[in-house]
Each structure stands twice: as C-alpha cells, then as structure tokens.
C-alpha cells in the first residue's frame, strides 16, 4: 500500500497552485511536508481528499495502484484516506458518539450492524489515550470546543475509523505544548507497517513528537528538496533562504 502522486497539477479559480508535483509515500512510513506560506501544502491535502473547490488539471494520485481522483469524496474515505483538517468544522446537533458511530456503520456491509458494546469500549479506550473526558461523547461535534479539543477530536475520529492513509494538515496549528504532546501520542499509537502518514506542518517542533522517516520541502507547487528528519532541523535554523538560489528560482 503506497500513495503515489505523479505530475499533479491543480488550480483554484483558474490560478495554478500545484505545478507538476511528484511524491511517493510507502505504507509504514511517515512523511512530513514543510514549506513557506502559499507553496501549496494544504492544497495538496485537499486535492487528495477530494475538495471540490480545486480543479485537477493533470497528473494522477493512486492508493495501492487505484486512481483515487476518479472517486467521489465518500469513496476516497472508504478506500482508506483520512484528512485531519487545520480548521475542523462544527456539526451542531450531532453528538460525537453518534457521528463516529454513523461513519463506522456506513463502512459495514449492507445488513450488518455495529456492536454497540464493542463500539463504546473501543471509543473509551481511544479517548483515554487522548485524555478526553467522557462528556465529549454527548457534545455536538466540535461545537464550543477549544482549538486543542477540536484537534483531539479529529485524531479520535481518525483512530476510530482506522484509515490506511492519514493526512494531517497543520494539526499543530493553535496547540500549546501539552495539547501537542497528547495529539502526537494519539498519532503515534496508530503508526504501523500497514499505514502511511503525510504530516503537513510549518514548524519543526511537531516533528519532535511525530518523528518522520522523510521530510520534504515544498515551494511554488512542487517538491523541491527531500531528506531525513534532520532536514527539518536545518529549516528551523536557516529558514527557506535556499529557495532563493538560482537553481530553484
């Protein structure tokens, strides 16, 4: 199982954002993408997930050899793609427990029912990992939540849905250090040889807790540099001055 992005081109309102991007993330690996504002990092995540604001102008995205760009959003989710948003949406009137339960039920074969006892046992165990109070099961999805609570809730959904490929779009945005550690603990509990991760971040500090196998630098809609986790430390120290070099201009 691997996610392969080949020569991907995408635009929004006729403005090109992704300009022939290439990326391969094998199962079992965590890849981080860093880059300056406007480089296309969040656009990449949304195009993979199927956000309809973006138009794909060329290239392909495959998951285990299957073209996901031909799929509807719900089909991509069932195929194993999960996107944790930078700004999680509120769903008034729908409790967290019912929201997650409905998502899991939708993935079962027709006629099969989710076991309620097993569901809540699993839900509570994962909430414990994320240090979430039981009261959150009855609260409407993200309504009135703090930034940290919303991010924990996103990771709880991800843990419960057990996707094959996880995309975290600036999950560290707005988190204090304690909340970041808890969110990272949830993510790390899901790391396995059968699951891939794409972690999009501006800051190296998240990568202290979710240590990547590979770090990529994105600029002007393309991957311009890749390396080990030490690359994130270099970026933290020197910024993106190297992008101004003639070879990358």
Image (cartoon, rainbow, N blue to C red):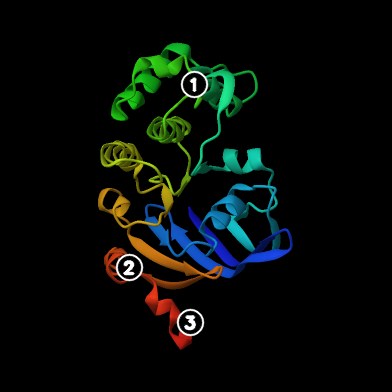
- What residue is pinned by disc 3? 248
Helix, strand or loop for disc 3? helix
Q: Residue at x 51, y 56 (%)?
A: 3
Which of these two is toward me, 222 or 16? 16
Precedes in sequence: disc 1 or disc 2: 1
Q: CA distance from mark 1 to mark 2?
A: 38 Å
- What residue is pinned by disc 1? 96
| Closer to the eye: label 1 or 2 | 2
Precedes in sequence: disc 2 or disc 3: 2
Instruction: Report whether residue 172 is seen.
Output: yes
Q: Residue at x 68, y 47 (%)?
A: 71
Precedes in sequence: disc 1 or disc 3: 1
Left or right of 69 in this view: 150: left
Q: Are marks 2 and 3 in contact (CB under 8 Å)?
A: no
Q: Residue at x 59, y 50 (%)?
A: 46
Q: Residue 185, percent across and down?
A: 29, 38
Q: In the rendered view, would you say 79 is above or below 90?
A: below
Alpha-carbon neighbours of circle 2 within 10 Å: few (<14), some, or many (≥20)? some
Q: In the rendered view, would you say 141 is above or below 239?
A: above
Q: Residue furthest right?
A: 14
Instruction: Report whether residue 63 is seen.
Output: no
Q: Residue 118, percent across and down?
A: 41, 16
Helix, strand or loop for disc 1? helix
Q: CA distance from mark 2 to mark 3?
A: 16 Å
Q: CA distance from mark 1 to mark 3?
A: 46 Å
Helix, strand or loop for disc 2? helix
Q: Residue 93, percent across and down?
A: 59, 17
- What residue is pinned by disc 2? 235
| Closer to the eye: label 1 or 3 | 3
């Amino acid at each position: 199982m691997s996610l392969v992005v080949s020569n991907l081109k995408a635009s929004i309102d006729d403005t090109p954002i992704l300009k022939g991007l290439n990326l391969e993330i094998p199962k079992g690996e965590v890849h981080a993408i860093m880059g300056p504002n406007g480089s296309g990092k969040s656009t990449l995540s949304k195009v993979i997930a199927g956000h309809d604001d973006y138009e794909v102008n060329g290239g392909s995205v495959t998951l285990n050899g299957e073209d996901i760009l031909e799929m509807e959003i719900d089909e991509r989710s069932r195929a194993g793609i999960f996107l944790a948003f930078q700004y999680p949406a509120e769903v008034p009137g729908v409790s967290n427990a019912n929201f997650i339960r409905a998502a899991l039920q939708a993935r079962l074969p027709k006629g099969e029912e989710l076991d309620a006892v097993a569901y809540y046992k699993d839900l509570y165990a994962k909430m414990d990992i994320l240090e979430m109070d039981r009261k959150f099961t009855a609260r409407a999805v993200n309504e009135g939540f703090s930034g940290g609570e919303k991010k924990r809730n996103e990771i709880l959904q991800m843990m419960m849905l057990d996707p094959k490929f996880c995309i975290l779009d600036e999950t560290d945005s707005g988190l204090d250090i304690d909340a970041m550690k808890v969110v990272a603990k949830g993510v790390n509990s899901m790391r396995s040889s059968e699951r891939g991760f794409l972690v999009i971040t501006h800051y190296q500090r998240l990568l202290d807790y979710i240590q990547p196998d590979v770090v990529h630098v994105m600029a002007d809609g393309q991957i311009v540099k890749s390396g080990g986790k030490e690359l994130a430390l270099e970026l933290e120290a020197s910024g993106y001055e190297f992008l101004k070099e003639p070879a990358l201009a």
